[in-house]
Amino acid sequence: MEKNSTKNLILTLATIGIISALLLTFVYEWTTPYIQAKQAQAQKQAINEVLPGVEEVEEVEKNGNIFYEGYDADGSQIGVAFQNSGGGYNGAIEIMIGVDLKNDKIYKISVLNHQETPGLGARITENEFKSNFEDKAFGDYSVVKTPPSEEMQVQAIAGATISSENTTRIIEDGLEKINSAYGGGN
Amino acid sequence: MSLDFKQVVSDFKNGLWAENPIIRLVIGMCPTLAVTNTTENGLAMGLATSFVLIMSEIVISLIKKLIPANVRIPSYILIIATFVTFVDYFLKAFFPGIAASLSIFIPLIVVNCLILGRQEAFASKHSTPRAIADGIGMGIGFTWVLVLLGAIREFFGMGSIFGFTLLGDWYRPMVIMVLPAGAFITLGILVGVMNYISREGK
Amino acid sequence: MEEFTQILLLFISTVLINNFILVRFLGICPFLGVSKQVETAFSMGLATTFVMTLTAAATWLINTFILEAFNLPFLQYVSFIIVIASLVQFVEMFIKKTSPVLYKALGIFLPLITTNCAIMGLALLIPLNGYSFIASVVFGFGAGVGFTLAIVLMAGLREKLEFGDVPEVLKGVPVTLIIAGIMAMAFMGFSGLISM
């Protein structure tokens, strides 16, 4: 049958392929500005959340990473924010960490993106878990199941130990990157 | 081309119950179990899948005569993949929250056997109006089961529906419901109940 | 050596802890459809594992050297599915030539591997998790092994169930789903086995 000849085969697939690629390029060009705008907005919100009282942010590149230096209304540096990502239970978790370099402690963290289980691992975005890292000194943290009795302890979310652990590791890794860039560190 | 209205309506109604994709045809199971942990996710997935299904059925019923028989499956898949990519980017740009919740299950719409199955079984063999009716019917049929399953799992698993907390703090959520095990069991019972209903109706 | 341990842990976690079917919900259609007999289930598992391993390698290469190099992320789904469809076609021809008996036994299930969401899911998870080439191949292989494990277990249970007394309304799909739920609960016991 002429219709099933190899030439027609390749022609059909190639035509569909090319039309598809063209349409998708158009879709990509159309949506990318919106996607980037949303991401920039989310990032800005996160920086505002983790650096209390920040008025101006300056983007600085060190060691191949981008750091956000935050300054208050008087122009003095509040601290530095850094976005770190790592593997979670179901996919990548992106966390914005705001640190006070003068006092070697974390101001606050904000979870930007995650794929954790709703009702369980997803609770890393709730204040109850995030408060573990509020006003916290730098160091090696250990995740425990009971309310923390020491500064270096982090209380896991009930039923979501792995998500809690992974998030803590990502924060520790982020602190390492900040310290190696800003020369502080223990 | 004469439009047989009765036929079109019948094609539409088919997908809602008699040949409901999830309960009767047992296709499209992966997203059914994975994204029904909340009602909102179930609805979003149902709508996204319906969109791809309807658009693909339209395109394929229009160009069916142009596609050689031995490349029809790859051709259908390419067309489906194109629409899925469109939905993915559209959601990322305008509904990032939903895009994040559904994550990899949006691209997985490409291999949802429901969509490919309908192209092969229907769109490639019937007129475009009928294909549209089939797409809408199947789409709604798929969506209502997802929403029902999502509502059940969210209600028992988190005490809420669509994010609105319905049960107060006194309720100890059955966390298993939002986990894979609960999904399997709930759907199993649901299909069993549907089987019972359709049997009793005879 | 540390790299090797990581890879080994990845394998174990993919087979047991993040089992593709029972935890990630990928591959449910063949799971429900092909799990009636242990032998068929095992053959399907083998064929799928083979395709998965090759898919992991192929899509990693395409993603790294074409999609990322030329900034074409929007062609990911289209290119991945072409790769998968082609690989399945190739595996089909390979099995037809080397073992016509197996080819006949698998029948329609072979081309259906293309629509197995576990394979596409696998291809998508690799760039999401940023695995290296070796890690990707191990991940693909592990996914196949986990898949095979789950459907063979299910087939074994269903074979036994043939002699059981299942209520009419639950026969077929419903009881299989309920059993899958119980299996999923059992597999939940594996989580926390390894902290990665």
Image (cartoon, coloured by chain):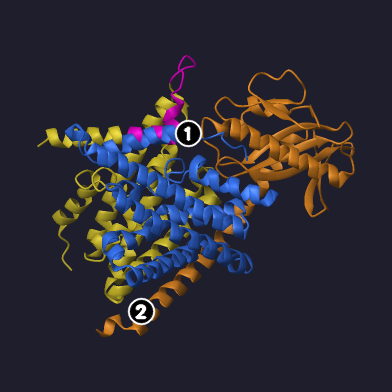
Image quarter hosting the C terminus of chain A: top right
Which stretch appears magenta? B167-186
Q: At 39% from the left edge and 35% from the top edge, which residue is drawn?
A: C183
Q: Could you confirm whether marks 2 and 1 are on the same chain? A: no
Image quarter hosting the N terminus of chain A: bottom left
Q: Estimate the x, y position of residue C157 in percent, counting from the top left.
A: 30, 39
Q: At 35% from the left edge and 55% from the top edge, which residue is drawn?
A: C44
Q: Secondary structure at mark 1?
A: helix
Q: Is residue B79 visible?
A: yes
Q: Estimate the x, y position of residue B152 in percent, counting from the top left.
A: 36, 30
Q: Is residue A125 visible?
A: no
> Which residue is nearer to you in this view: B201 or C108?
C108
Disc 2 target residue: A9
Q: Which chain is the one coloured orange?
A: A
The kind of residue on which mark 2 rests is Leu
Is A116 magenta? The answer is: no
Label 2 close to label 1 by CB (< 8 Å):
no
Up the image or down, B200 lies above or below A68; here it is above
Q: At 29% from the left edge and 68% from the top edge, which residue is drawn?
A: C100
Q: Estimate the x, y position of residue C88 in percent, counting from the top left.
A: 40, 65
Q: Which mark is residue C188?
A: 1
Is B173 magenta? The answer is: yes
Q: Colour of chain B?
A: yellow
**Marks 2 and 1, how far apart in space?**
47 Å
The kind of residue on which mark 1 rests is Met
- Residue situated furthest top in the rendering: B170
